[in-house]
Amino acid sequence: MNDSGIIVDIQRFSIHDGPGIRTTVFLKGCPLNCKWCHNPEAIAYKPQLSFNQEKCLNCFACVSVCPTGAHFIKDNKHEIDFTLCQLSGDCVPACPNEALSITGKVNSVEQVIELILKDKDYYINSGGGVTISGGEPMTQFQFTKQILKACKDNSIHTILDTCGHAPSEKYLEILPLVDLFLYDYKESDYDKHKEYTGVYNDLIQKNFNMLYGAGAKIILRCPIVPGINDTDKHFEAICNLYKDYPKLLGIEIMPYHNIGLDKARKIGAEGQFISIDTTDKEKSREWISALNELGCTNIRLG
Amino acid sequence: MTYNINEIKQISIETKMKDYSKELKITEVYKAYKDAHPAIKEAMCLKAEYPAYFTPIQDGDLFAGRLKQGRVGFTIDEWGPTAFAYYCQFEEIENDLKTYDYPAEEKAKIEEMLKFWETEDTSNKIRKEYPPLMAQYLFSDDWMNTSGIAFPLYRLTGSTPNFKKLLDLGIPGIYKEIEELKATAEFDGRDVQFYEGMKIAIDVLADVCLYYEKEIRLLAEISTIDEKKEELNKIADTLHIITISKPRTFREAIQLFWIYTYVADIRNYGRMDIYMGDFLVNDLNAGIIDEDEALKYLQSLWQLMADRNTVVHNRVIIGGKSRPNEANADRFALLAMEATRTVKEIEPQLSLRFYEGMNPALFEKALDVIGGGATYPILYNDDININSINNAFGFSIKEAERYFTPYGCGEFILEGRSFGTPSGVINLLKALEVTLRNGVDPVTGKVIGLQLGNFEDFHSFDDLMNAYKKQVEFFVSLLAEQEVLEYKICGEEAPFLYNSLLYDDCMAKGKGMFAGGIKYLGGTLETYGNTNTADSLTAIKELIYERKLISKKELLDALDNNFAGYENIQLKLANAPKYGNDNEIADSMLERVHNHVCNFVKNQADRVGLHSYLVVIINNSANTLMGRSTHASADGRKAFEHMNNGNAPSGGNDKEGVTAMLNSIAKPSTSIHAGSVQNMKFSPELFFERRDIIKSLLKTYFDKGGSQAMITVLNRGDLENALVEPEKYRNLFVRVGGFSARFVELSTEVQKDILSRTLY
Ligand code: SF4
Ligand code: SF4
């Protein structure tokens, strides 16, 4: 039993991750490495140092406290080498302008539940609840399971936002605790899936079939990234799913947003991600009508 | 409670040489009746003022009644910071004399008039009576521009009399009532002058109607457009009828009501759906008017209210428990909201009382109107407020239910039965900063507070807390005594005839409101800086006393230097727990500060002999104005920046989202004060696209004990753009605390304050 886990953030009054007013818990750690990731700070399993360049005053307070030399001065400017950081945390309080922080902190199940319960009345009145997201919550399986269990004990509606890439038996184990799955469907082509996310999609498809077959309530979430998966072939595949899986509760299109880049920069990981413009409204609408034309009607922007 | 939300503009400036003949006339009349019975003196002054101060109707008005108040006169409310009761606007007049070249003879007369009022102006009379301690510590009347802990306010504001009685009886009925009561008094050998004064006042009211009738008939005569002629004659006919009959139609009712609000200087209108609902529905049923016509009436009335431009008043209440004619009242309420939606003005401040089980169409309509950008109606939760009033004021539930009506800034009163003018302000944050420095004001360097020791001497947090409390208590006591003094002198000065006429027990007793006539005479005290004070105390407790991360000296040095060179300390202070995040430590400190001041104030009532004396936590530009004379504070706020609004989290500090914010603001007890204001802002996206979410959010907040909500729908982008292109955003209204204002007309400082508060 793990009584604690690592979270990136807990967002209250979350209204875009399922029905009603929700609290969304973002867990750290993900087995995938999507090129377009919106939450790059949630990929690594461990906490990370985060540095906000805009706030840096070049005062070098961090340089003098860091035991490992992660902060250093170059051309009279503050520089940082993330690979050297040992997470001592010394530099964070030393910085006078909050340019430094640690992303990811250990929380106990009780802490999380305590926070969740504060908004219980809002969930009840709005038909909302709790969404566990990430990262990939299945990577902190025991932690996720315990939070979900505690939610169910308190009669709170639960959602698991998952990429589908986790051992099948774990999904079966957690199924009774999940009222609704937000299940990612990223790319239909086997090789492209590997290219863009770092894993093949066979396990994901298998788990999807299994959950669907077991009667799970599922909303499919499809991130669409211009120039990557906004292809006819992928759209057709989405429509086929729509036809073949009539009990899906809906399909949501998640247009690419480059907000992830800025976050990646802060943890020194921007090189791993694509850099393109945020999708404009026009484009998203085009996608929706393209999908509509292919016969996929119960579809909306997520 | 401020006079001008845009800027601190304390005096109104004339654009051309002002004619002083009316003011001189009133002064003469006052002199002549100076020693007469107060009722006669007041009646004669009213006669000199009205209709003289009334101004012609304007194009499109369906009702008569516009007014330009003079520089000398009589009012139950106020015409400037110290201009109330018998008032003289000294500063303005002196300014006129300086600006314009008055003929020597006229100038001499005006100067003599000024000199005369020096001792007769009611505020001056009150200040003269201050006992030494009061005079020493309440040393200034200019709270907007002076650094200080507490200030008196000279005003008798928020009167909300029984309009139903006015409309039920009409002028003839009231006249008859006065005659009868006078006869009884005569028989009992009691004072009859009170009733004599009343009779004169009613004559003045009728005179105003007849004056307008005559003027309007003339306008009708010269008008060349038939429709206009006809409309004007209708207005004139209405004016005529109400002088000889009680109002029979919706139109007559509105006309009589409106003129009355001016002669009586009543700026808040109580539960209008009760006293207007039957008139409306009777007319509709009888086919006298249709809904369209009825809406036109209200639109015209709304426009007249807007043009009255009171900034803080013009309250109209609709909805709520115990309306005897609920179905008719609901119909009026819906029409009133439609008028607000279509007239699109800052006033009236339409307010909807609601409760579990009320016709849901009203709440639904309210959200539509708010969504249209109106910021109205303001929502009042009966299910919480009635019990709160019962506890805070000691009114029975039945009374609280029937009469409660928030006015002006949001203080609860009972229509036609209770009164509780805010007559003092206290800056809690200033009290704290003075306490940290042994009585010395860091802004002026003068000793202005009790000297209870230096910060270093407060060895535990409780030592500090106790000193702060003592400081606050000392000033609250003075303000409570000042309020009683103010009532006493006002009671001696005048019976406030038009108001007493419609306030319970005054007529039967033959006594003015403040001379023992009114049933429940209470008072209120406005507190400011509540959240900054609590957050400062939290930071001090956490960082200095408990975690010892900052020393006392370091804190004082940082504050004295406005954090220059102490950015690290400011950051630590700013990162201490803050109210508004559903954080137990911060929220409980707010409750501690709140409970202390509310309970201490409440307990003053018995000591000083008021029916109630309660805190009111409003939010208006006073937070900004008083912030300007308050130094850097331990919550990380820089010197002279605005303080928080009312009970709201201080700007930008509610970081945990709207549910956390609502949970926090629902925590402080609502049953120990006279009212508080809660602002909320939502983005249009949320408000329109997720109406379900908004509804459940509000429902939960109200279920949790939320008493009130003022909702603005806008987004940050709106405001930022409005700063850049003001001309495109003239329609953008925001709530500055308790009041609505055109965003583009606000000072940059206030605009920034609004921007700094979080939008969801
Ligand atoms: S967290 Fe510690 S090791 Fe990492 S950069 Fe900061 S001081 Fe250096
Ligand atoms: S301490 Fe903060 S502000 Fe100073 S150099 Fe380091 S990151 Fe920049």
Image: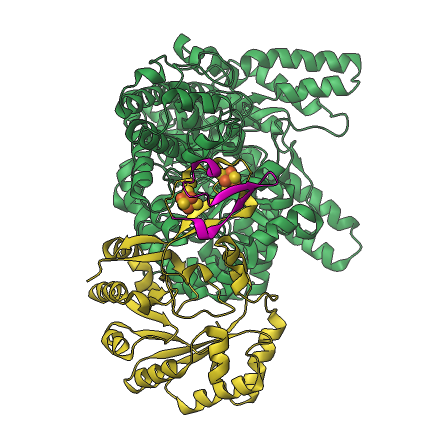
Up/down of B675 relative to B491, above or below: below
Up/down of A209 relative to B101, above or below: below
In percent of width and height, residue B687 lies at 49, 61
Query: Which chain gets the green colouring?
Result: B
Question: A37 or A151, which lies in front?
Answer: A37
Up/down of B600 relative to A199, above or below: above
Q: Quadrant of ligand 1?
A: top left
Residue at (46% x, 78% y) in the render: A194
Question: B353 or A185, which lies in front?
Answer: A185
Per the rendered image, the range of residues in magenta is A62-86
Question: B728 or B318, which lies in front?
Answer: B728
Q: Would residue B121 be seen by someone viewing this image from the given angle?
A: yes
Q: Would residue B272 be seen by someone viewing this image from the given angle?
A: no
| Shade representing chain A | yellow
Question: B20 or B191, which lies in front?
Answer: B20
Residue at (42% x, 43% y) in the render: A68
Give the tally of numbered discs.
0
Q: Based on the displayed image, in which of its 4 quarters is residue B294 positioned?
A: bottom right
Q: Is residue A82 magenta?
A: yes
